[in-house]
């Protein structure tokens, strides 16, 4: 017997606002027959092909420590720096720049979403191929 991951859940203070932010960042969509709306305590977004889902669930407590699980984002168009710039423009914050940590061309940038949840931005496939 085995299990599979049904979806990734993110505890948050405002499910609608955070789901809208991540929907924009990831180019995900709402569930066709269950669109997210202000005031919803649970908001689901998914890839356009339905292969991955993220559920945002409101909880009473605020984030207080580093995430134990986080997203690693790999830019599909452009470079790591271009993606960092785009995310900063839509409300992310930079937590740590770990580029070059393991030599030239290595590393990532750790960022946080509007509620402080950390995630990392990696080099794009094109950048990795150049190395």
Image (tube, rainbow, N blue to C red):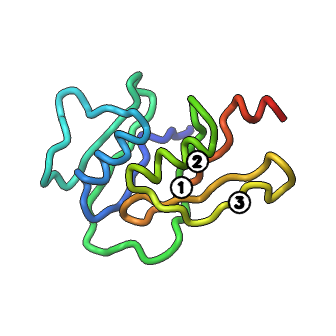
| Disc 3: which residue | 98
Residue most extreme to the bottom: 64
**Residue 2 falls left or right of residue 54:** right
Measure the C-alpha gap from mark 2 to mark 1. 6 Å
Report helix, strand or loop for mark 1.
Answer: strand
Which numbered marker is on residue 72? Answer: 2
Q: Secondary structure at mark 2?
A: strand
Q: Earlier in the sequence, mark 2 or mark 1?
A: 2
Q: Residues within 10 Å of mark 2 (few under 14, many from 20)?
A: some
Mark 2 → mark 3, Cα distance in angstroms? 13 Å
Query: Quick one: SS at disc 3?
Result: loop
**Closest to the observer, 57 or 64:** 64
83 versus 28 height, above or below: below
Q: Position of residue 103 (x, y in %)?
A: 86, 53
**Residue marked by disc 1:** 119
Crowdedness of circle 3 by 10 Å Cα count: few (<14), some, many (20+)?
Answer: some
Confirm or deny contact between disc 2 and disc 3 (CB under 8 A): no
Residue at image position (34%, 74%) is 62
State yes or no: discs 2 and 1 in contact (Cβ < 8 Å): yes
From what the image shows, is residue 97 above or below residue 33? below
């Amino acid at each position: 017997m085995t299990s599979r991951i049904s979806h990734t859940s993110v505890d948050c203070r405002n499910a609608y606002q955070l789901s809208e932010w991540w929907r924009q960042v990831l180019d995900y969509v709402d569930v066709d027959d269950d669109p997210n709306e202000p005031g919803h305590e649970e908001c689901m977004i998914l890839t356009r092909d339905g292969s991955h889902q993220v559920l945002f669930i409101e909880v009473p407590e605020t984030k207080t420590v580093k995430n134990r699980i986080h997203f690693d984002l790999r830019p599909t168009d452009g470079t790591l720096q271009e993606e960092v710039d785009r995310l900063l423009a839509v409300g992310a914050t930079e937590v740590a720049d770990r580029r070059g940590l393991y030599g030239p061309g290595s590393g990532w940038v750790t960022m946080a979403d509007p509620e402080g949840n950390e995630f990392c931005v990696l080099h794009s496939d094109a950048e990795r191929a150049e190395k």
